[in-house]
Image (cartoon, rainbow, N blue to C red):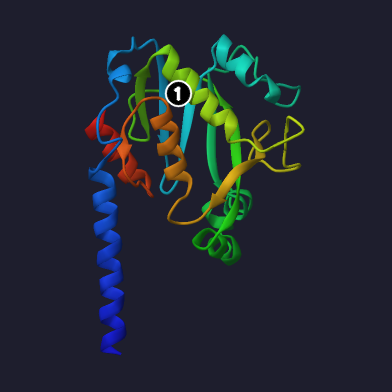
Amino acid sequence: MKTGIHWLLRIILLVVALATAGTFIPRPLIAPVEASSAVATHRILLLSGAIHTDIAIPLDEETRAAFSFLDDGEFPLGHPNAEWLVVGWGGRAFYLETPTWSELKPMPVLRALTIDRSVLHVDLAGHIAEPQPAVVAFDIGDEQLARLRNFISDSFVRDAGEVKLISNAGYGEIDRFFEAEGYFNALFGCNTWTAAALRSAGLRTGFWNPLPPSLRLSVAVYN
């Protein structure tokens, strides 16, 4: 019994140590020169909740053109009041079956803790107030935003060039779910995808950011 408790404590301490190191060891180790010298003409947002993060990118002409494959009557990408495209990546079972904490079920949790197929959640937003605890803003240049758009676009699974919409899945009237590249698990989940997306835009994150507080802290330290 004591041996089992000792091993459990060791595992907990190891996870804490890895999470701490993952937060305070920057990735990349050296700040990109091009990012520091770029003219910051665009604003992007990191949106965070208790366990999940999304990225919001401005709905300018280039963004609407890059994601024109999303634009139809049910997802009004060109709506004049839409200011942000909000994208998040996550585990299929947990994301689709847990729109609210009150709907939490054992099987999606089990899939999230092991391995699951991934999906992308896409939504539109109007004005997002700043500052607020759940919103972190970054100003980046043209090339950095272009790379971020490409990173997000490349995360969609495509069949003969067409993205794969998951029918009858969504939390509201216009948001949508799509099949995504990669597999989800608790160690490399939604927040590590968000961190990789931010790095594609020339920002620095921690080496491993499995939770929103870790990601928020690391981007605050290194950007």
Which one is nearer the viewer's eye here, 106 or 208? 208
Within 10 Å of disc 1 (Cα), the crowding (few <14, some 14-19, many 20+) is few
Q: Position of residue 148 (x, y in %)?
A: 48, 25
Single out the residue that lies furthest toward the bottom.
1
Q: Residue at x 73, y 29 (%)?
A: 161
In the rendered view, does 184 fall on the left or right side of 128?
right
Q: Tell me which corner region of the image, top left, top right, bottom left or bottom right, holds residue 34.
A: top left
At mark 1, the secondary structure is: loop
The vertical placement of 127 against 11, above or below, is above
Quarter containing the N terminus = bottom left
Q: Position of residue 163 (x, y in %)?
A: 71, 33
Q: Total label count?
A: 1
In the rendered view, does 168 fall on the left or right side of 13?
right
Q: Tell me which corner region of the image, top left, top right, bottom left or bottom right, holds residue 213.
A: top left
Residue type, label 1: Ile
Quarter containing the C terminus = top left
Which one is nearer the viewer's eye here, 54 or 69? 69
In the rendered view, does 93 fall on the left or right side of 214?
right
Q: Position of residue 185 (x, y in %)?
A: 50, 56
Residue underneath mark 1 = 128
Q: Residue at x 22, y 34 (%)?
A: 221
Which one is nearer the viewer's eye here, 179 or 169? 179
Q: Residue at x 49, y 62 (%)?
A: 113
Q: Position of residue 150 (x, y in %)?
A: 54, 25
The vertical placement of 220 against 23, above or below, is above
